[in-house]
Image: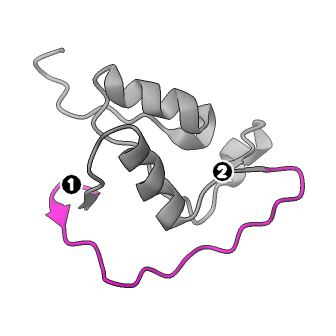
Amino acid sequence: MLPNVTNIQASWLTVGKKVAQICLHSGANDFGSIMIEENVVSAAGARWRFTADGIQEAIKEAGYRPQLRTQQYEYRELPEHMVQQELVGEGMIVD
């Protein structure tokens, strides 16, 4: 890739699960995360929703190992029990 770009995010929130999985196979090294306040992308028409377990499962389905990271892209251990976000399905695509 580009020598000055070290991380590329697939951003499942805007492209959905299947396209984000393709992005991983195309060089992206970050699937994206759960947004606490995704009002901006929701207002723009993004309708995808995932739980923490759903994100990890989608990454595994694509053949990769999920890895939690900080905002500085430093690895963190996955907690044993992650609290799952409650998903409201009305008008949304819950994967």
Q: Which residue is mark 2?
A: 95
Residue 16 versus residue 95 in the image, above or below: above
Q: Which residues are magenta?
A: 71-92
Amino acid type assigned to the residue bearing label 1 in the image: Gln
Secondary structure under tag 1 reads loop
Measured from the top left, where is residue 88 in percent x and y?
Answer: 79, 66
**Residue nearest the viewer, comparing 86 with 43:** 86
Q: Residues within 10 Å of mark 1 (few under 14, many from 20)?
A: few
Query: In the image, what residue occupies the spot 19% across and 68% down?
Result: 76
Residue 36 at x, y percent in the picture: 58, 66
Side of 81 relative to 76 (left or right): right
Q: Residue furthest top?
A: 2
Circle 2 Cα neighbour tier, 10 Å, few/some/many (<14 / 14–19 / ≥20): some
Between marks 1 and 2 in the image, the one whose residue lies nearer the viewer: 2
- Residue 48 tag number: none
For the residues labelled 1 and 2, say whether their Cβ atoms are less than 8 Å apart: no
Question: Within the magenta stretch, is there residue 1?
Answer: no
Residue for point 67% across, 43% down: 41
Hey, what amino acid is under mark 2?
A: Asp
Q: CA distance from mark 1 to mark 2?
A: 27 Å
Label 2: state its secondary structure. Answer: loop
**Which residue is drawn at the image coordinates 47% and 47% (left, top)?**
58
Q: Position of residue 86 (x, y in %)?
A: 68, 74
Question: Residue at 30% of width from left, 80% of height from top?
Answer: 79
The quarter of the rendered structure image containing the N terminus is top left
Q: Earlier in the sequence, mark 1 or mark 2?
A: 1
List the residue tagged with mark 1. 72
Position of residue 60 measured from the top left corner of the image (x, y, whole percent): 37, 48
For residue 28, above or below residue 92: above
Q: Nearer the viewer, residue 24 or 6?
A: 24
Q: Is residue 76 magenta?
A: yes
Image quadrant where residue 19 sits:
top right
